Image (cartoon, rainbow, N blue to C red):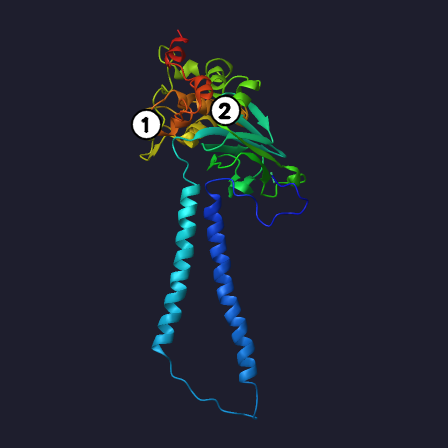
């Protein structure tokens, strides 16, 4: 870690993205220098060489050059396309979270980062992750737009009220790295900072088991669903069923009233809880009450995690399924909270 007091020119490279972003950045600098230096030199050279030697001189006329025009079209084309392709590849790579990533929830709030792991542990302004493992952050905010920024990982993403945004990374080096809010969000924006602590898998497992954990998001969501919010009274099978049964729906396409269709993902689940009459599934009445204002962002995350756990085979449910990474025995045990979905249905008799 940095022990000297001077500010380093570049943050450490601590994720698989870091060298890619830096390579593109250095390429941009090289291109800028390659243009700036000859242009400035030519200005100086021509200013001296063609300085005024006689009054009202008429220069020789010149009538185009095919070679010159071709060259100055092709070279900038190649340069701009390499910049575009480099940027596009890195962008798609960074903003397409892999299915086998370990999922962690982030909720931004003026002025702190609230983080919750799949095993239930919570932390504030600190994010512990294992090294060499893909991690996906599912993020939202309770108030205004924030931006989750980890310079050493060369990645950041806006955190937007009313929707989920995602960030993923794979840390390559253990250590402690800066976490910033990179979007002005009010008075204490500059204080909305923290640390990302990258640990060896074994240390991470120890840390997880040594930290007090409450309910896992899936357990908390189940509790809300069955008891606190009473969702089960309509959504469980049996006599009281008026809403859709939610087992196995995530990741599947569905037809809506009005003829459109969509894939049921995190965002759809969230919308259906907060604004249920906006996207009514064909064959159902818009009778579900809104839960806007009754659930916090963290409770929403839990509900979504629980509903996703009822669809263990869905691609988007990868995060709630037991970790596929062989190096996570401890996390895997507590992670697989999704128990057979039956109890939700039976509790309603
Ligand atoms: Cu949160 Cu700036």
Q: How many marks?
A: 2
Image x and y of residue 197, in percent = 56, 32
Examine the image and state in which quarter residue 191 appears.
Answer: top right
Using the image, determine if residue 89 lies above or below residue 197: below
Image x and y of residue 65, in percent = 36, 79
Q: Secondary structure at mark 1?
A: loop
Using the image, determine if residue 306 lies above or below residue 79: above
Judge depth for marks 2 and 1 and give the one in front: 2
Crowding at mark 1 (Cα within 10 Å: few <14, some 14-19, many 20+): some
Image x and y of residue 274, in percent = 48, 28
Image x and y of residue 170, in percent = 46, 36
Residue 202, numbered circle: 2
Examine the image and state in which quarter residue 70 appears.
Answer: bottom left
Asked whether the viewer can see residue 275, the reply is: no
Q: Secondary structure at mark 2?
A: helix
Residue on which the image places disc 1: 282
Quadrant in the picture for the N terminus:
top right
Examine the image and state in which quarter residue 278 appears.
Answer: top left
| Of the image marks 2 and 1, the number of the one nearer the N terminus | 2
Query: Is disc 2 in contact with disc 1, using a CB cutoff of under 8 Å?
Result: no
Query: On the rendered structure, is 53 left or right of 315?
Result: right
Q: Residue at x 50, y 62 (%)?
A: 32
């Amino acid at each position: 870690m940095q022990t000297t007091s001077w500010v380093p020119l570049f943050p450490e490279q601590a994720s698989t993205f870091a060298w890619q972003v830096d390579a593109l950045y250095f390429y941009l600098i090289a291109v800028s220098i390659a243009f700036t230096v000859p242009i400035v030199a030519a200005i100086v050279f021509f200013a001296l060489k063609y300085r005024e030697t006689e009054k009202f001189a008429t220069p020789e006329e010149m009538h185009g050059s095919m070679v010159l025009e071709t060259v100055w079209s092709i070279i900038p084309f190649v340069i701009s396309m390499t910049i575009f392709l480099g940027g596009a590849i890195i962008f798609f790579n960074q903003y397409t979270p892999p299915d086998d990533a370990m999922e962690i929830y982030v909720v931004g709030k003026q002025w702190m980062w609230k983080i919750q792991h799949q095993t239930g542990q919570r932390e504030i302004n600190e994010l512990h992750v294992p090294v060499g493992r893909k991690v996906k952050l599912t993020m939202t905010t309770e108030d205004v737009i924030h931006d989750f920024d980890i310079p050493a990982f060369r990645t950041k993403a806006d955190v937007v009220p009313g929707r989920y945004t995602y960030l993923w990374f794979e840390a390559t080096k253990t250590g402690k790295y800066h976490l910033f809010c990179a979007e002005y969000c009010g008075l204490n924006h500059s204080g909305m900072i923290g640390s990302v602590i990258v640990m060896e898998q074994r240390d991470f497992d120890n840390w997880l088991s040594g930290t007090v954990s409450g309910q896992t998001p899936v357990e908390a969501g189940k509790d809300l669903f069955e008891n606190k919010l009473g969702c089960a009274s309509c959504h469980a099978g049996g006599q009281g069923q008026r809403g859709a049964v939610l087992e196995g729906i995530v990741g599947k396409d569905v037809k809506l009233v009005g003829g459109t269709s969509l894939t049921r993902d995190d965002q759809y689940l969230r919308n259906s809880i907060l604004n249920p009459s906006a996207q009514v599934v064909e064959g159902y009445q818009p009778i579900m009450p809104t839960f806007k204002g009754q659930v916090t962002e963290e409770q929403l995350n839990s509900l979504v995690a629980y509903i996703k756990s009822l669809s263990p085979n869905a691609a988007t449910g990868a995060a709630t399924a037991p970790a596929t990474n062989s190096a996570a025995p401890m996390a895997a045990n507590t992670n697989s909270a999704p128990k057979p979905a039956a109890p939700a249905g039976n509790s309603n008799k």
